[in-house]
Image (cartoon, coloured by chain):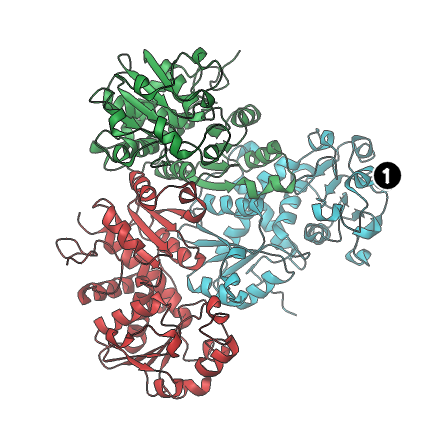
Chain colours: A cyan, B red, C green
Amino acid sequence: MNNPQLNQHGELQHLLSTEGLPVRIVRDILDRAATFLGEGHAEINKVPLLHGKSVFNIFFENSTRTRTTFEIAAKKLSADVVNLNIGSSSTSKGETLLDTVDNLCAMHADMFVVRHATSGAAHLIARHVAPGIHVINAGDGRHAHPTQALLDMYTIRHYKQEFHNLTVAIVGDVLHSRVARSQIHALTTLGVPEVRVIAPKTLLPSMVEKLGVRVFHSMEEGLKGVDVVMMLRLQNERMQGALLPSAQEYFKYYGLTRERLALAKPAAIVMHPGPMNRGVEIDSSVADGAQSVILPQVTFGIAIRMAVMSLLAGTST
Amino acid sequence: MNNPQLNQHGELQHLLSTEGLPVRIVRDILDRAATFLGEGHAEINKVPLLHGKSVFNIFFENSTRTRTTFEIAAKKLSADVVNLNIGSSSTSKGETLLDTVDNLCAMHADMFVVRHATSGAAHLIARHVAPGIHVINAGDGRHAHPTQALLDMYTIRHYKQEFHNLTVAIVGDVLHSRVARSQIHALTTLGVPEVRVIAPKTLLPSMVEKLGVRVFHSMEEGLKGVDVVMMLRLQNERMQGALLPSAQEYFKYYGLTRERLALAKPAAIVMHPGPMNRGVEIDSSVADGAQSVILPQVTFGIAIRMAVMSLLAGTST
Amino acid sequence: MNNPQLNQHGELQHLLSTEGLPVRIVRDILDRAATFLGEGHAEINKVPLLHGKSVFNIFFENSTRTRTTFEIAAKKLSADVVNLNIGSSSTSKGETLLDTVDNLCAMHADMFVVRHATSGAAHLIARHVAPGIHVINAGDGRHAHPTQALLDMYTIRHYKQEFHNLTVAIVGDVLHSRVARSQIHALTTLGVPEVRVIAPKTLLPSMVEKLGVRVFHSMEEGLKGVDVVMMLRLQNERMQGALLPSAQEYFKYYGLTRERLALAKPAAIVMHPGPMNRGVEIDSSVADGAQSVILPQVTFGIAIRMAVMSLLAGTST
């Protein structure tokens, strides 16, 4: 099967998933992102790489945070940005998703940033658009959220330099998390020898081991000796659901506390994609502690999105 | 009576309606739009014609699609664009429409793009603003939607070159359609010798013939030998209303199918202002077929809006 | 106590309140605003002072009007503007206010424009952000709305030249008004010898005299001989409340009519922060009359916001 993300020359045509993304492209994105961050990351300079290009943020699912990071990244590249909250728009008038996309293409969009509640929506759009148009998946259902995973990889490389000697634990609701799926694929692509998932059975996909991870149901076991702790956000709707007794109960067994973090390597870093539920999946003392790199992740996220957009804009058609 | 769209020198001061719009101005807009579209319409280049100008999209009625086309057109002209969804704003605080407009004028708006559910709203605003400010009607009640009609004229000219030898049919809910009104005025202004409307009696204004059109109640009769088929969107609220038995019933009698389209000239083109109700007013095989020019309409719409804005910006005050 | 608005060099670091704002800074802002307004205020030119900077409008409370003025001001300074309506965003996902702010800081925001229903919210954010980031209070609870007060001062200076010889009356719901508080502090800072408040007892804070104002409960008494009448907006929710019998009753005793305005000096000007409730706090004949400077206030508001933003952007860190 063709890789739908690459063109015939093996260049990145769309960013849909970290699954099947060649390691050379992952490394290219990380290197490119570094060029946008000045010394000490104090400043991201505006550059004219996308001047005259139109980037459409089409969000069928609301996410101010993710939309904002893409908007800033596009504006730092001097693109024109159009925000479309499609939930309240044409599809509510009965227009099909692909009719909406066709119309936006006809408006000479250069790039789509797509968030959709349905897995595969970004792929569907990518297959549908004309060759000159690029699609970035900003989260589709439970499937993938590749820019989040790439900024996580950037963060790990920034603090740990290498991937081949790391033990990384992903903690929490893997079952419903597109972030976790994209992280696992990115980590294995970059050669991380041991990727662990730590979660109760009810929050793990069946046969999760097939993704190449070690499964732990105990924080005390799973955190032992890890270099990187990647927390997942517990969605509010899970907390009242049948899968979990309560937020308090979850924190008791799977919340990241200082005591549990002490089981990891002394130089271990703590990551979280945000927004955090303090006191549910993570204790405030850890979230704000010396090992937390949660805010640098956000900064790196702007640079990663600039890198992906500028890479796509340079892809021949 | 003065034409409220023209200044004392006969230049376009506001674009409110295609009714009474001089043919020289219509042709100027079409010619100007052509300059923004490159070879093959693959690209619309960003130009600095409105640099430093502020365009306000004030939408009292929600329409992401139309608002987006104006936003893109303004940004391609390098204007600053401010989107105002007034439904949820000052008018809900009890401020009058004209107070809102006065305030926006005082913010040094250069151009207003106005959509309002009430016929005549754009005229009211145009009469009220200071001489240096331009108003574009982006749809007012059942009255007018002139940029839609102008992009339709551009489309017809693009595919048919001339107007003086055409038979054009407008099909559907003419009664509630500002698009149809604007199309009829534009077509007759440009010298189309035969404009037909095809609709059930319940969806036609009384005395529609006074607009200079031939009335048909049968698709089979009305489509015979036409060069251009302009479909109208059937508003969802009509489908459950007293005027129509059901969407299925409507499609049975007035849906554009391949069989019916075959009654038109072989080179006839099919247009639709979008968003389409597939299977209600138009069959998918026609919408996506070789005679459909529905997506080019969207592209031409950006160029037409750029043309109107740049023409207005150059009008002396 | 340190003034939280100033840095160690006494420069403006944040604009949070007119209370405690040094008179030299107030005058600097007024002078700077004048430079953005051309002859006759017909034009505000776009300048590159904030090119490459990101301004975040973070509105926890909806206000299209105020948000729009800041958006226009920032765009006239060539900044990139990101609008965040936080009510519908992360905080609804359970994220704390300061987590939201931390995240936006990590996105390399240069400036925050904050509106919040809670008094002190902008101060809280200002204390929290890194040194290079500036906060502008666009209204916090009943506490302060400094840019409104500064544009009012600009308006007074424009029409009256001096402050030291004026009698100014503030009329209406002082109790719930952040605008009134900020106006009183600005007027006394600029040396206005007599500031009056005119309101029923139920709409005055207890011990309002401590702010340095003279209290009147009668329009006829309070308006006598004043140079400036500053009307306050009566919030809709007050009109049905226990504090007021009805809007009609309010207008009868406290509405600004031509008859009452005749008690002021012949050259007195009438101001209102908008949006107006015509027929409640102000009669239309006054609002649209020769003494009204309500629309110039709006124009000056753009220039004042440009002045504040450009001043902050130039502050050393």
According to the image, label 1 marks what residue? A220
Please say if B100 is above or below B270. above
Residue B4 position by quadrant: bottom left
Asked if one can make out residue B77 in the rendered structure from this viewpoint, the answer is no
Residue C256 position by quadrant: top left
Q: Nearer the viewer, residue A301 or B70?
A: B70
Task: Name the spot of residue B119 as percent of width and height, x first.
Answer: 32, 59
Using residue B23 as the reference point, say whether residue B57 is left or right of it. right
SS label for mark 1: helix
Three-letter code, disc 1: Glu
Q: Nearer the viewer, residue C308 or C245?
A: C245
Please say if B209 is above or below C33. below
Task: Name the spot of residue B39 as percent of width and height, x first.
Answer: 33, 67
Residue at image point 78% right, 48% down: A193
Q: Chain of mark 1?
A: A
Using residue B20 as the reference point, say whether residue B152 is left or right of it. right
Q: Residue furthest left?
A: B9
Task: Name the spot of residue B222 as percent of width and height, x first.
Answer: 35, 85
Residue at image point 30% right, 70% down: B183
How many discs appear?
Answer: 1
Task: Name the spot of residue B251 as percent of width and height, x first.
Answer: 48, 79
Asked if one can make out residue A264 in the rendered structure from this viewpoint, the answer is yes
Q: Nearer the viewer, residue B160 or B216?
A: B216
Q: Residues within 10 Å of mark 1 (few under 14, many from 20)?
A: some
Please say if B160 is above or below B220. above
**Quadrant the N terminus of chain A occupies:** bottom right
